[in-house]
Image (cartoon, coloured by chain):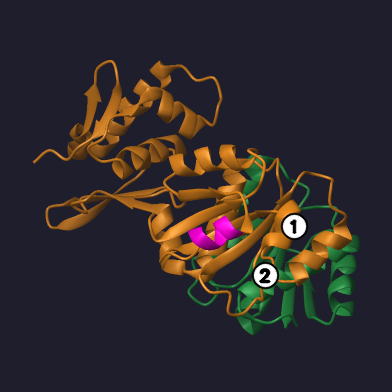
Chain colours: A orange, B green
């Protein structure tokens, strides 16, 4: 989503690089900044910013009054687990930070927290992040509500019985309409690093095609590469 | 600012209510999800803190009920639970939780999180 930008400020590669890789795969626009100056440069565009700041660099951050913080929709502080005393964490939260997380947080939880903060700052943007639709508007996929709605005969039809994995794969393909998405990318994004056979992906795609009925043919198999969502006229 | 607590453990419910009351909040504490829903439906609240495992109506079911009701879909909700696995947390966030905190709590940080959420929700600190 291009109107919302996640800015990670840290002098270390990790966890920023891993978080960025995960979030980009999930459709977020992410930038890593190494200093307060770089952060200010990145933050001066038109995007609404969700800032993830390394506690070691709090001295470089602009003042963060809870009111009038400009385009920073949320300021989330992180540090290595167990390095910050509770008193200090409480002080940061009371001082205007919206959240505190440990650097070993599961990236899925991180994304959930970003969505919560986005929901408070800009509800419409949060809904957009959770919902993916094809360019024609023929199909809408809501990831958090696990809902798939297709346009049919002038009306809309909700597809029932979709599993979380099927909805995740479909959202991934629809968000990259016209682009071939390889199986490895699907496995990494949907199963988050678990060992999953590519045939497993194929089975879910088959199930998806059946459930989507006439829209199922929009999921093309690209042999030797992966799958592509393309609406057949 | 009025906070509604739903917690089936008597000791923890009393502890939570005391901590929040001493911090200056108005507190209503209910022993299960159904009573919490009745309380909310009748008198409302500015923020909710729910345990996940409760008899009758679980915290997640209660949260989903809130989020599907136009009156409460924007109400800040903290889930407080011993179920702290990643999958449990994701279930909570997907159901619409604003915070998902594991028990036991550290009082200072907990109160700071309540304050931060109230600020985000535009309800001020107290």
On the question of residue B65 being in view, the answer is: no
Where's residue A225, x and y in %?
Answer: 30, 20
Callout 2: few (<14), some (14-19), or many (20+) C-alpha neighbours within 10 Å?
many
Where's residue B101, x and y in %?
Answer: 74, 55
On the question of residue A106 being in view, the answer is: yes
Vertical side of B93 occupied by A12: above or below: above
Q: Main secondary structure of the magenta part?
A: helix
Determine the residue positioned at 52% across, 54% down. A6
Vertical side of B104 occupied by B118: above or below: below
Which labelled disc corresponds to residue B117? 2
On whether residue B109 falls in the magenta region, the answer is: no
The image quadrant of residue A77 is bottom right
- Element carrying mark 1: strand
The image quadrant of residue B30 is bottom right
Front residue of B54 and B74: B74
Question: Which residue is denoted by mark 1 in the rendering?
Answer: B80
- Element carrying mark 2: helix
Determine the residue positioned at 46% across, 16% down. A197
Chain part drawn in magenta: A37-42
Vertical side of A194 occupied by A5: above or below: below
Which labelled disc corresponds to residue A164? none
């Amino acid at each position: 989503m291009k109107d919302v930008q996640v800015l990670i400020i840290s002098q270390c590669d990790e966890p920023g690089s891993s978080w960025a890789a995960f979030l980009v795969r999930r459709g977020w626009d992410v930038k890593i900044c190494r200093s307060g100056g770089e952060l200010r440069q990145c933050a001066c565009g038109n995007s609404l910013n969700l800032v993830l700041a390394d506690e070691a660099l709090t001295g470089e951050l602009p003042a963060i009054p809870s009111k009038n913080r400009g385009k920073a929709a949320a300021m989330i502080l992180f540090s290595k687990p167990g390095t910050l005393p509770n008193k200090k964490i409480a002080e940061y939260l009371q001082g205007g930070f919206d959240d505190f997380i440990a650097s070993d947080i599961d990236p899925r939880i991180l994304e959930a927290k970003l969505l919560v903060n986005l929901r408070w700052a800009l509800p419409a943007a949060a809904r957009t992040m959770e919902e993916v639709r094809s360019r024609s508007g023929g199909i809408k996929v809501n990831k958090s509500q696990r809902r798939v709605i297709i346009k049919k005969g002038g009306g809309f039809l909700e597809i029932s019985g979709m599993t979380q994995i099927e909805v995740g794969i479909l959202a991934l393909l629809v968000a990259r309409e016209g682009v071939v998405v390889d199986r490895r990318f699907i496995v990494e994004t949907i199963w988050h690093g678990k060992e999953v056979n590519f045939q497993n992906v194929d089975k879910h795609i088959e199930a998806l095609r059946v459930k989507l009925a006439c829209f199922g043919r929009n999921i093309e198999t690209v042999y030797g590469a992966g799958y592509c969502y393309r609406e057949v006229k | 600012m009025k906070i509604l607590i739903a917690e089936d453990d008597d000791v923890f419910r009393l502890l939570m209510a005391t901590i929040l009351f001493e911090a200056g909040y108005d507190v209503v504490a209910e022993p299960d999800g159904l009573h919490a829903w009745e309380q909310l439906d009748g008198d409302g609240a500015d923020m909710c803190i729910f345990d996940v495992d409760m008899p009758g109506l679980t915290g997640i079911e209660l949260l989903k009920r809130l989020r599907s009701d136009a009156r409460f879909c924007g109400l800040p909700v903290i889930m407080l639970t011993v179920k702290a696995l990643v999958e449990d947390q994701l279930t909570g966030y997907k159901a619409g939780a604003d915070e998902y905190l594991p028990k036991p709590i550290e009082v200072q940080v907990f109160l700071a999180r309540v304050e931060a959420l109230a600020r985000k929700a535009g309800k001020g600190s107290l």
